[in-house]
Amino acid sequence: MIEFEGVGHRFGERVVLEEITLTLPEQRVGFVGANGSGKSTLARTVNGLVRPSSGTVRVDGLDPVRNGAAVRRKVGFVFTNPDSQIVMPTAGEDVAFSLRRSGLPRAERARRAAEVLAEHGLAGYADHPAHQLSGGQKQLLAVCGMLALDPDVLVCDEPTTLLDLRNARHFAELLRGLRQQVLVVTHDLELLADFDRVVVLDEGRVVADDEPEPALDHYRKLVT
Amino acid sequence: MSVLGLYVPGRSPLHRTPAAVKLPVLLVFVTATVLVGSPWWLGGACALVALGYAVARVPWVRLWPVLRTVVMLAVLVGGLQLWLVGAQAAIVTVLRLVAAVAAATLFTLTTRVDDVVSVVERALGPLRRVGVRPDRLGLLVGLTVQAVATLSAIAGSVREAAQARGAGRSPTAFAVPFVIRTLSHADELGDALAARGIGDEDDPPGTRVMDP
């Protein structure tokens, strides 16, 4: 369960979030809004990458500002550009890198990594140079790097922006199958069609919070 | 892909030799090429490295950029030396350079970065008592190797963009976007590392109790 209570944030003079209060028990929640509406910033407060200027965030009762390490073990984060998330040269090494701190022996880490890759359609790619994977495969690899740690929550910041339609749909399929609670910030409205809840942000405030259809209708009207 | 080349999967004896053996051997070999001054010995060293490439069965596609880089370096440095200090010194320097660069590249081609990182971590383990964090230094080694590939990719795409605007030869058209893209990559990489929990724990790896 993720709770925002009066969360506000500013970068210098610019207010990016204002008085966000939300309780999110749903399995899959989407955030939409124009560029600069504050949705990425809000997502980053969930694992403490951004410390809100005011208000508090709670992840299963833990505050990401005070218990950052504990929260980050619970919350996986997938960014838009997989190139900056992949830190090791091969796919297997990159997933195993997530497990470095698990205390598992090296051979076991490599085995776990290959297993996670296989589960998500990257079987046989463990020794493949990570940066030679296709865009869709790279994003899958980034997700594998997170899922290897078995988090309870997966936050994704525009995960399908760089993907083609087929890969974007494949990614949506993957999210559908996860046991994790999923929070997705996106401009890909198709991705949210079967979500449990969609929150629309505009200029740092919540302007709609509903089931996907009415929420997305509101968002479309906002743009016209 | 960088000219230095990265790991090529394989099952050759060189691939199977543990990094804990290869890394010290490489260090001794490179040191020796600096200390030895005889062109015969250095020529032998080059032949030895060439033999290593044959044993590792590095595929041609990966060997070609390595050869190109080594030859370019040899011509450039050799030419300069020939002009400045004479033939004998030029031959020694070129052989020395070729042996060292080729040996180091052979090491990266046959060794996973993860293995190198583990060796560095283990070797530096005793320094933990004086406050050194071996896992951090290991990560630093890994990220440094990776940075070579990343920066050359950024340089490639920036060069293309400059050419597309007809500014292929302008140094600023290259430098400004290159620096900006590099810094923004560093920003994103930092966020991604933080999100993966790097820098969170003050206890060394392995002693951590998972979630309470």
Image (spheres, rainbow, N blue to C red):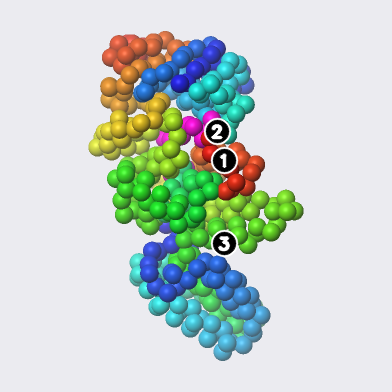
Q: Residue at x 54, y 54 (%)?
A: B142
Looking at the image, do the residues carrying marks 3 and 2 touch, with CB atoms under 8 Å apart?
no
The residue furthest left is A166
Q: Chain of mark 3?
A: B
The x and y percentages for residue B175 are: 54, 47
Direction from residue A3 to residue A211 in the image, left or right: left
Q: Chain of mark 2?
A: B
How much space separates mark 2 and mark 1, taking CA atoms? Answer: 7 Å
Direction from residue B27 to residue A173 in the image, left or right: left
Residue under pointer 1: B209
How much space separates mark 3 and mark 2, taking CA atoms? Answer: 31 Å
Amino acid of disc 1: Val
Q: Secondary structure at mark 3?
A: helix
The label shown at residue A107 is none
| Earlier-in-chain disc, 1 versus 3 | 3
The answer to whether any part of residue A158 appears in the image is no
| Earlier-in-chain disc, 3 versus 2 | 3
Q: Secondary structure at mark 1?
A: loop
Amino acid of disc 2: Pro
**Range of the magenta residues?**
A71-84
Q: Nearer the viewer, residue B30 or B138?
A: B138
Direction from residue A74 to residue A13 in the image, left or right: right
Residue under pointer 2: B212
> Residue A76: within the magenta?
yes
Q: Residue at x 30, y 11 (%)?
A: A214
